[in-house]
Amino acid sequence: MSNLNLEIPAEVREFAEKTVDQARKAFDSFVAAAQKATSQSEAAAESMATNAKEVSSKAIGFAEANVKAAFDLADKLVHAKDPKEILTIQSEFLKAQVASVQEQAKELGEAVKKVVSSSTETK
């Protein structure tokens, strides 16, 4: 019984080495793809967050400007001397606000479009 040959044949070892090497290469490819996907999703999330912050900042800035304009109107109306001046002040305010709101809507629309397009580009 001492003559038993328990050595693994060279062909079996060679096959096992190739199998382990192929598995390692497949795993490395999987990890690289996972890292790339993670990087892309992080970049997309950062881009969306930045763009959403821009939209929020614009909206707050517009609201602030509109409230300031309303206070300025109130101040002018308080100091008006007669109904004719009140009507003139009110008319000027309305013209200015219509133009301002149109511009604000345009800017907000462009900012929102930017957010939406950046989120669809990353999908």
Image (cartoon, grey):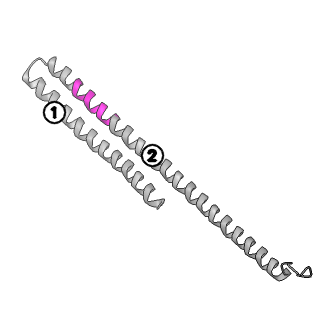
The 10 Å Cα crowd at callout 1, few under 14, some 14 to 19, many 20 or more, is few
Which circle marks residue 58 in the picture?
A: none
Q: Identify the residue under disc 2.
A: 49
Q: How many marks?
A: 2
Residue visible at 23% across and 36% down in the picture:
97
Which circle marks residue 91 in the picture?
A: 1
Q: Nearer the viewer, mark 1 or mark 2?
A: 2
Image x and y of residue 34, in percent: 59, 61
| In magenta stretch: residue 26 | no
Q: Secondary structure at mark 1?
A: helix
Viewer-proximal residue among 36 and 76: 36
Residue visible at 30% across and 31% down in the picture:
64
Q: Is residue 96 above or below residue 84?
A: below
Q: Is residue 63 above or below residue 48?
A: above
Main SS of the magenta part reads helix
Seen as rendered, the residue at the extreme right is: 3
Q: Amino acid at mark 2?
A: Ala
Image x and y of residue 51, in percent: 44, 46
Residue visible at 24% across and 35% down in the picture:
96
